Amino acid sequence: MRTCGCPDDTPVVKANNVIKDEFVKYGHTMILVQADDIRTPEVLGAMAEIQEGVENVPRVVAVSSIASLLNQVPDDKNVIEHKIAALPFDLRRQYVINDYTKGLMLIKIDGEMDGNELVVLLEEIKDVLDYVEMPGDVVFVPAGMDVVGSQIEEIMDKDKVQSVLLSLVLVIILLFLALRSFMGIILALLPVLLTIIFAMGTMGFLGIPEGFLTLMIPTLL
């Protein structure tokens, strides 16, 4: 087996395989928290409730946030401010910005999921966010490259039929202008259509999952 065209016995490939097998066992996704001031019992209480719900999602390993650093959220805002200020700066800065209007909830997830499993996990996290009652001034937004990639694939999957049909119509128009014959158009398109059918059939037979690149195949062909 080769990785990026390099033999498996190449030192760089060996090192990369060791890192993947021994160290990269987990992935991460995030939830962005936006509020006038995160240091309130209502906002931190919502974060704690979201953390509890997300930790019950299958394949989620752990959730951490500024709320989890406090162990139990106090009912008094002044106490909260004092406890957060007492945290080491480097630790506090991982979860909130200096003016406390934005924060992060870091979600540690199983790194061995395929694309479909990741989409299911992200949907379940969204369900948790929809279920928890939010204070009026706070917004919780799923974030991270996994979320962006999932949304890109979702948009492309919705639009792939339209893009294929649009490409086909444009090709037919160009062929008609060049050949001035419907039979010529059919003969010119036949190899392309057979190639698309063969490519998609082979992917299905080999169990290759749909992804960002595979969704582009019909349009490119």
Image (cartoon, helix red, strand yellow):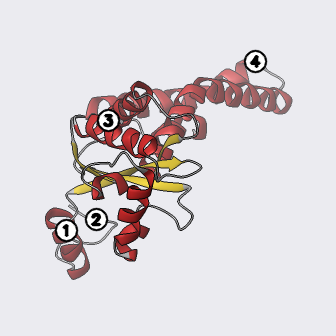
- Kind of residue sitting beneath label 1: Asn
- Kind of residue sitting beneath label 3: Leu
Q: Which residue is mark 4?
A: 182
C-alpha separation, residue under disc 2 versus residue under disc 4: 46 Å
Query: Which of the numbered marks, if any, corresponds to residue 3?
Result: 2
Comes first in the chain, label 1 or label 3: 1
Comes first in the chain, label 2 or label 4: 2
Examine the rendering and report whether any part of residue 1 can be seen.
Answer: yes
Say if 79 sits above or below 17 in the image.
Answer: above
* Side of 95 relative to 20 (left or right): right
Say if 182 sits above or below 122 in the image.
Answer: above
**Front tag of 2 and 1:** 1
Q: Which residue is mark 1?
A: 17
Q: Quadrant of the C terminus?
A: top right
- Where in the figure is residue 54, as x and y percent of width and height? 29, 38
Q: Residue at x 39, y 31 (%)?
A: 123
Comes first in the chain, label 2 or label 3: 2
- Kind of residue sitting beneath label 4: Phe
